[in-house]
Amino acid sequence: MQKKYIEYNPDYVPEGFGMSNTGAICWWNALLQTLLGASGLTDIMFAYETEFANNNFALAYIKFLELALSNKATSSSSITLFNAFKERLALKSKVRLDQGQQCAHEGFTLFIEMLDNRRVDKLFTTSYEVTSTCSQCKYVEIYQRDTSFYITMGMNTRNDTLFTNWLRVHEGESTPRECPNCSKCTIGQKRVEKLKQLGEIVCVLFSSKLHTPTMQMHYPQSLSFSAKGGGVLKYKLIGSIEHAGVSNMTTFSSSGHYWARSVRCDSWLKFNDSLTPTVCSSTSAESTFMVFYHME
């Protein structure tokens, strides 16, 4: 009988190895190291390989995963995959990665989009029910909104309870949206977002507004949510991407450097390009940019 959820499976997580930075691709190395720790994605790639038959990037990723799990992946392998990623982007989008540093969160979105598979999308998609109040006529509108594979957290929650409660319910950012009642643009409308559905992998991006030289990002080691129909969904922290420098959330460009931390063989390892992975802590740091949780 097929399981309802795709749970974390350490058998689909490879041992640690470094990746060369051939020029402003530390974001790619950090992202790839984090995704290698996301066993659910590897599970889908292998289980439904036939669904990727016409996607050269997806096939290249499956080949890379096979090499990684057999301890045969090299820096050359990651560059081959990166080139397949760029070719897919050139074919399917207007994004070009020939020059300049990419933001890791936008790179993450593009990575998932280029796999172009509904099962993969569902793995990362979180849905919120949005209650919006028009600033003009006070009309209340309720609609559902899916995240773009990650949740942007706009505040430093300081402790585990506040972090989880924020994910459940929070005030959303005000965006221009025409009121269906009075047809006026409701900039400044009040929006409350209530969690409706989680994917098996939850990614949280800390807003660039939070990053200061002295602010330490807080995030729990685990998450728990009530499941629809009863029961509890439990998630464990599996990885993080860290960044030092400047990141522009509007233009999706950045400067500085990215590195990652990820669970491998029951140990946390720090991955910094081609440097030998070193044992590290999973606790928060000032440089934390994105965190990833996987359903247990």
Image (tube, helix red, strand yellow):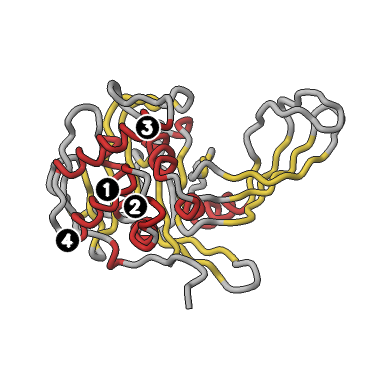
Element under disc 2: strand
Q: Nearer the viewer, residue 117 or 253?
A: 117
Q: Nearer the viewer, mark 4 or mark 1?
A: 4
Element under disc 4: loop
- The span from disc 4 to disc 2 (Cα, nearest Å) is 21 Å
Q: Residue at x 52, y 64 (%)?
A: 224
Upstream in sequence: badge 3 or badge 4: 4
Q: Nearer the viewer, mark 4 or mark 2?
A: 4
The image's mark for residue 89 is: 3
Report x, y in % for residue 26: 25, 35
Give the residue type at disc 4: Ser
Q: Nearer the viewer, residue 30 or 146?
A: 146
- The span from disc 3 to disc 4 (Cα, nearest Å) is 28 Å
Name the residue tied to disc 2.
239
In this view, which residue lies farthest toward the bottom?
Answer: 1
The image's mark for residue 70 is: 4
Element under disc 1: helix
The image's mark for residue 255 is: none
The image's mark for residue 33 is: 1
Report x, y in % for residue 284: 36, 48
